[in-house]
Image (spheres, helix red, strand yellow):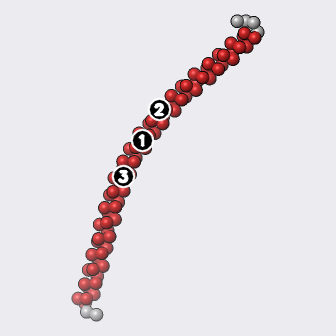
């Protein structure tokens, strides 16, 4: 095999490697773009979940307070104090 043929084969392989590298780079860039979008959505979702949890915590605390007051009122009524 002549040197020219070998160089030609090496160049062909390098061209294929370059093509694969370009495709992988484009794929990576698209992946990074989608990941960035999803990260923003996750941040918004976390914020919403935190707000909802805070509302439920407030409601839960109110229900517990009402239950305690109602329980105390029932005991006082049973004892004839009120």
Q: Is residue 38 above or below residue 11?
A: above
Q: Is residue 65 above or below residue 15?
A: above
Mark 3 or 1, nearer chain start: 3
Q: On the picture, is 26 further left or further right than 69?
A: left
Q: Is residue 18 above or below residue 79?
A: below
Residue located beneath label 1 in the image: 43
Label 2 vs label 3: CA separation? 26 Å
Q: Quadrant of the N terminus?
A: bottom left
- Residue under the point 76% across and 9% down: 79
Q: Are marks 2 and 1 in contact (CB under 8 Å)?
A: no
Which SS class for mark 2? helix
Residue 41, by quadrant, is top left
- Residue under the point 55% across and 28% down: 57
Whole-percent x, y for residue 5 in the image = 25, 88
Residue located beneath label 2 in the image: 51
Mark 2 or 3, nearer chain start: 3
Label 3 vs label 1: CA separation? 14 Å
- Residue under the point 25% across and 84% down: 8
Residue located beneath label 3 in the image: 34
Whole-percent x, y for residue 64 in the image = 62, 23
Q: Are marks 2 and 3 in contact (CB under 8 Å)?
A: no
Which SS class for mark 3? helix
Image label count: 3
- Residue under the point 62% across and 18% down: 66
Mark 2 or 1, nearer chain start: 1
Residue 56, by quadrant, is top right
């Amino acid at each position: 095999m002549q040197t020219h043929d070998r160089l030609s084969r090496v160049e062909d392989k390098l061209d294929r490697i370059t093509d694969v590298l370009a495709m992988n780079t484009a794929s990576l860039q698209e992946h990074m773009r989608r990941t960035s979008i999803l990260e923003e959505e996750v941040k918004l979702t976390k914020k919403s979940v935190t707000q909802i949890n805070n509302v439920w915590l407030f409601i839960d605390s109110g229900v517990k307070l009402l239950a305690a007051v109602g329980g105390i009122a029932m005991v006082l009524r049973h004892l004839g104090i009120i």
